[in-house]
Image (spheres, rainbow, N blue to C red):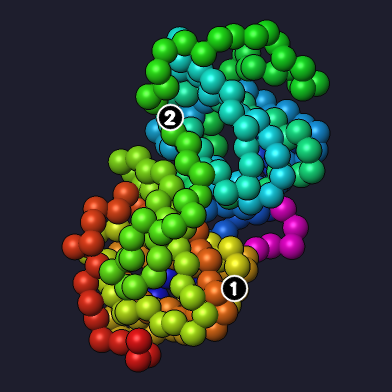
Amino acid sequence: MHSWNTGTLPLRPTRTAPSGTVDVRIMPSLPSGDIVHAQATSPSTATPALLDGITEFFYILEGQGKLWRRLGAQEEVISLKPGRCVSVPPEVEYQFQCTKSPLTFLVITAPRWDVKHWHEISEGYWRSDGTEARRRPRVGPIIVWQRQDLPTAPDYLAPDGSEIRLLLECADGGVAHCTLPAGKTAAAVRHKTVDEVWYVLAGEGEIWRTQDGEEELVALRAGTCITIPVGVSFQFRASTHLEILIGTFPRWPGAQEAVSVPSHWRT
């Protein structure tokens, strides 16, 4: 039995998030990390909470909203918009609000999500009706959380030849945006120490995965989610322009992580 998994975006929500306002669709995952699809109704305000033992990254696909984060005297409210990635580290109080059309986003969690890590707090920035509970100034430099908008130009070419745009990371994992132009085939590689979970944002293609004599070829299209556990050799190609959000667990250590392996397709 091979160690990797493949899934497609479910037509119906798998569950409701503990925040009470978000429909979640569960995708294939690994103990080291996962990616799930989430959609908040509009207008709505999530229950304020904090996490322990895990970090969450939100990557916004559609819609508009706001996110409040606080740790001690440091806090801020920022807008949520397509292409923006934000982090919620452990022990940071947070709350988000959907202000316009439904807010659709991917949640990348490192390690894998478990409800035991989510804790409701008594007070957030907004009341349940969406009004501000009280105004608070931002105090001090923000050093405990991050945000990053999708870069226009790639940061570098991955060892397999695909274009990588860096988003956010922590010790347990990171998020990057990957593109492969139509007609291109990436080099075949194997990772030495990291797991990956991919979610296809747009385009079509194929991926080949193999380990210990087992192999599989599957289609990649918008809504497909795949896992690539450490040690699995893989290669992918694009029939149309492919865009993929990649969660890497733990964070990507550098180009030396990828080892070249015999190709399934000519590059």
Q: Residue 235, located in which quarter of the rendered image?
A: bottom left
Circle nearer the N terminus (1, 2): 2
- Magenta-tinted stretch: 8-13
- Determine whether label 1 and label 2 are within 8 Å by CB: no
**Residue 152 at x, y = what percent?**
49, 54
- Which residue lies most toward the bottom here? 266
> In the rendered view, does 38 fall on the left or right side of 225?
right
Which residue shows up at 25% across the image and 86% down it? 262
Instruction: Name the residue beneath numbered marker 1.
Output: 203
Q: Indicate whether 3 appears above or below 142.
A: below
Residue 80 % position (x, y): 62, 37
Q: Is residue 189 visible?
A: yes
Q: Residue 11: within the magenta?
A: yes
Q: Is residue 45 left or right of residue 3?
A: right
Point out the image quarter for the N terminus. bottom left
Front residue of this view, candidates 98 and 28: 98
Q: Which residue is mark 2?
A: 145
Q: Quadrant of residue 156?
A: bottom left
Quadrant of the rendering where the C terminus is positioned: bottom left
Q: Which of 161 and 108 lies nearest the eye of the viewer?
A: 161
- On screen, residue 174 above or below 178: above
Determine if the magenta segment contains residue 227.
no
Residue at disc 1, secondary structure: loop
- Amino acid type, mark 1: Gly
Q: Residues within 10 Å of mark 1 (few under 14, many from 20)?
A: many
Q: Residue at x 57, y 79 (%)?
A: 240
